[in-house]
Image (cartoon, rainbow, N blue to C red):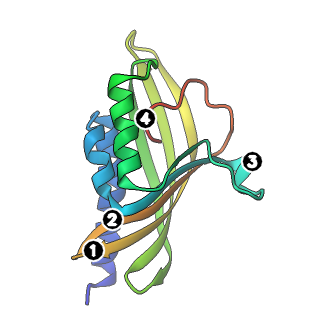
């Protein structure tokens, strides 16, 4: 049995690792933070309160995430930038066996190649995290944007 504080620390480390991989442009490692059939969605707050909850970005497997990264590297044209993800207020909302419902606030800044930094997106993560062989992985990661108006192309994950 894993102690509650160890579970929270492992979840916190997973959330921070998620942000670090994106900020360090280690996008190829990003899908490894999810279970094989893991889900990643970006949903504007306006859509979160509607049915259906239409996502502006949706992946329902590691394979889809890998394809997304491959297309970013080889086919897509987007504003080159350095992202900075800030993850705070991480809280376990509930548990079912080895799965945990987790909420966290996020802020993403982008610094362009000229050195100008701008706020890109603010919102919250609603995650389902499961432990596989003692390691936490995302079963589902939903980024709920506080606004639908994302100033540039949503290239890398939030």
Vertical comparison of 35 with 17: above or below: below
Tell me where residue 119 sits by quadrant.
top right
Q: Label 4: which residue?
A: 156
Q: Which mark is residue 46?
A: 3
Left/right placement of residue 101 relative to residue 16 reads right
Label 3–label 4 contact, CB within 8 A = no
Quarter holding the N terminus?
A: bottom left
Q: Nearer the viewer, residue 150 or 104?
A: 150
* Mark 1 vs mark 2, CA separation in Å: 7 Å
Residue 57: x and y, percent? Answer: 55, 43
Earlier-in-chain disc, 1 versus 2: 1
Earlier-in-chain disc, 1 versus 4: 1
Q: Which mark is residue 132?
A: 1
Label 1–label 3 contact, CB within 8 A = no
The local secondary structure at tag 1 comes to: strand
Earlier-in-chain disc, 1 versus 3: 3
Q: Nearer the viewer, residue 18 or 133?
A: 133
């Amino acid at each position: 049995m894993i102690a509650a504080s160890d579970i929270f620390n492992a979840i916190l480390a997973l959330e921070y690792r998620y942000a670090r991989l994106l900020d360090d442009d280690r996008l190829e490692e990003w899908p490894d933070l999810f279970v094989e059939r893991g889900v990643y969605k970006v949903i504007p707050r306006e859509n979160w309160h509607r049915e259906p909850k239409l996502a502006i970005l949706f992946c329902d497997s590691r394979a889809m995430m890998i394809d997304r990264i491959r297309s970013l590297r080889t086919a897509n044209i987007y504003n080159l930038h350095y992202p900075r993800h800030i993850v705070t207020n991480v809280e376990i909302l509930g548990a079912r066996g080895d799965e945990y419902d987790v909420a966290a606030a996020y802020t993403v800044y982008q610094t362009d190649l000229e050195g100008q930094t701008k706020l890109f997106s603010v919102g919250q993560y609603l995650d389902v995290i499961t432990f596989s062989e003692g390691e936490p992985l995302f079963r589902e990661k939903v980024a709920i944007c506080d606004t639908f108006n994302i100033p540039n192309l949503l290239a890398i994950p939030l």
